[in-house]
Image (spheres, grey):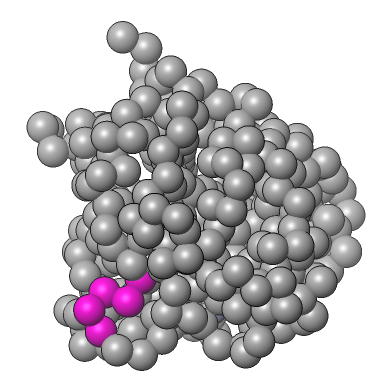
């Protein structure tokens, strides 16, 4: 049997919202990549879908409307949401609140105790956090001026190195903003290669095919939910879709499982600047996508799919 690979393509702050073009940028965005996989109007909150089930399955992919509220009131936050995805535990419930954006002590200690990166490494398999960090980030972490967010905390807790500017130059990493343009324009790295959006998607897929478990973290979608006009959010969604077109082109859907998911809603409600309590889309592409989709009702259910697909529990 061919080697299996699993990639989590994480989008911060992307939920399933109302069918209102004045507030929900998905209504105006042209998303040919995702539409081709999932059909029309896949991005609406399930109560307004015809089947009202929150599950879409096509020949190519499945989408599950995934609860991010985790049986707690209040607005879901990044640290606890990401920690839930990475541990399979209801972290907001364990710490008594939705917390973020960076983990506090309670969230950090849960992540350090066990997470998917650690399980993969313990099983003798390979893992990577594909998104790189600039030197200034490492300096700020070392001096204590900055805390790891949940995802890099999980990766480093497993003893994995974070990707650097050198990895980005060498094509071993892809930047959170996809093209590298932000590193060029705002971080002072004028020598990093600038990728087209489709090439960024292809490169993420190629990297994922060299590791058992990969995680790509795109956080600017949450920023696009917090700030800026709705038109900017429309362009942002179109940019993500173009990356996915490149990724889907290159994806080995016979052997490799792709999980696209998010930690909480935000960008789908541009009439306020806060996170939403909407469900988030979890999109599965690859072997068993339809079977696995039945396993998911909230964010804590994603880790079990990773464990099953990579056979982590049998070790
Ligand atoms: Zn946010």
Most foreground residue, 71 or 263: 71
What residue appears at the point 51 percent right and 21 percent down from the top-left corner? 252
Residue, far front: 50
Q: Position of residue 98 (x, y in %)?
A: 34, 84
What are the residue bounds of the magenta stretch? 68-72
What residue appears at the point 28 percent right and 62 percent down from the top-left corner? 298
Whether residue 69 appears in magenta in the rendering, the answer is: yes
Query: Magenta span: helix, strand or loop, mainly?
Result: loop
Rendered view: 119 above or below 100: above
Looking at the rendered image, the quarter that the C terminus falls into is top left
Q: Position of residue 112 (x, y in %)?
A: 26, 65
Residue, far left: 314
Q: Position of residue 238 (x, y in %)?
A: 75, 54
What residue appears at the point 27 percent right and 34 percent down from the top-left corner? 291
Q: Position of residue 117 (x, y in %)?
A: 33, 49
Answer whether residue 25 is visible to the viewer in this image. Answer: yes
Rendered view: 199 above or below 51: above
What residue appears at the point 88 percent right and 64 percent down from the top-left corner? 185
Most foreground residue, 115 or 165: 115
């Amino acid at each position: 049997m061919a080697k299996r690979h699993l990639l989590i393509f994480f989008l911060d702050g992307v939920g399933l919202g109302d069918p209102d073009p004045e507030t929900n940028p998905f209504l105006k965005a042209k998303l040919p990549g995702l539409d081709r996989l999932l059909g029309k109007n896949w991005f609406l909150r399930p109560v307004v879908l015809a089947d009202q089930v929150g599950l879409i399955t096509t020949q190519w992919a499945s989408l599950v409307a995934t609860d991010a509220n985790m049986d707690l009131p209040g607005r879901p936050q990044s640290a606890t949401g990401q920690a839930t995805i990475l541990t399979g535990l209801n972290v907001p419930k364990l710490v008594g609140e939705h917390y973020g954006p960076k983990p506090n002590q309670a969230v950090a200690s849960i992540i350090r105790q066990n997470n998917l990166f650690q399980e993969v490494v313990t099983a003798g398999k390979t893992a990577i956090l594909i998104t790189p960090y600039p030197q200034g980030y490492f300096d700020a972490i070392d001096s204590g001026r900055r805390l790891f967010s949940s995802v890099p905390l999980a990766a480093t807790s497993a003893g994995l190195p974070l990707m650097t500017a050198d990895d980005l130059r060498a094509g071993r990493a892809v930047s959170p903003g996809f093209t590298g343009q932000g590193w060029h324009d705002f971080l002072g790295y004028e020598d990093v290669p600038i990728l087209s959006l489709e090439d960024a998607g292809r490169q993420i897929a190629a990297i994922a095919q060299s590791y058992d478990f990969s995680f790509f973290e795109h956080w600017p979608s949450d920023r696009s939910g917090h700030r800026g006009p709705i038109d900017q959010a429309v362009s942002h969604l179109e940019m993500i879709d173009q990356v996915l077109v490149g990724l889907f082109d290159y994806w080995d859907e016979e052997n490799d499982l792709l999980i696209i998911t998010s930690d909480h809603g935000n960008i789908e409600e541009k009439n306020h600047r806060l996170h939403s309590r909407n469900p988030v889309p979890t999109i599965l592409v690859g072997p068993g996508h339809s079977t696995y989709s039945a396993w998911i009702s909230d964010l804590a259910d994603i880790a079990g799919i990773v464990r099953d697909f990579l056979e982590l529990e049998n070790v």
